[in-house]
Image (tube, rainbow, N blue to C red):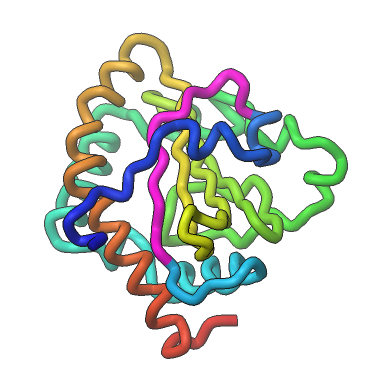
Amino acid sequence: MRGLTVPRLPQAAHTGLPWRIHALTGDFAVEDVWSFRTPGAGPDDFPVMLAALRAAAGPDRLSPPVRFLFAVRWKLGALLGWDERAAGVGRRVGSLRDRLPDDLRAAPRGPDSDGMPLEPVYELDTEAARELANKTVHAVMHLGWVRGASGAYELRMAVLVKPNGRFGRLYMAAIAPFRHLLVYPAMTRQWERAWRDRDRQDTP
């Protein structure tokens, strides 16, 4: 049962698939790969899943312990200047959109989201990418629609990171236990529930 297992996957579960993101992130490292069950999903349901996430997911709807962690992180960022605009995408680092080939540049970016600090890069029928940058890292969240070993389709999330020097590497190491033990399990429950409850949401 999913409740007794951790849906963390090896890096090859991301790197072994022909995603378009690979051509854009050769200087990034794959930090995490996570899976989310979507029972009954078909090959064309990636946009349905994205709509369900936009309607029913987000940091403000996670469990209280995880919301507390995010609040502490943003408070530290404000106090220490980690999240200043000068450290963001298009300032400290260039956006991945600057690396897009013509066909991806013409594809939809995906909507901006007030609830997440991630900026859209592109959104296709089976994959999407968003990015953020601050004084610690330049990070990419890649979502992909995959046919799993059981034959059912599922959502996979890969987090790709380019740390900002030694400080960025120490930061990623320090937050790893919190990501794996608290944040991602809470996201798994929330995202899988969003899929199950999608017909109850006023999704596009």
Q: How many marks?
A: 0
Q: What residue is drawn where x is 53% and y is 72%?
A: 41
Q: Main secondary structure of the magenta part?
A: strand
- Snapshot quadrant of residue 108: bottom right
Percent position (x, y) of residue 171?
27, 23
Q: What residue is drawn where x is 63% and y is 52%?
A: 127
In-image side of 4 versus 18 (left or right): left
Percent position (x, y) of residue 162?
47, 22
User: Over which residues does the magenta segment extend?
Assistant: 25-37
Please check the rendered image and state whether residue 33 is part of the magenta-colored stretch, yes or no: yes
Residue 115, above or below 72 = below
Q: What residue is drawn where x is 27% and y is 17%?
A: 170
Q: What residue is drawn where x is 44% and y is 68%?
A: 38
- Snapshot quadrant of residue 187: bottom left
Please check the rendered image and state whether residue 88 is part of the magenta-colored stretch, yes or no: no
80 or 1, nearer to the observer: 1
Where's the C terminus, which quadrant? Answer: bottom right
The extreme top residue here reads: 166
The extreme right residue here reads: 102
Residue 1, above or below 69 = below
Where's the N terminus, which quadrant? Answer: bottom left
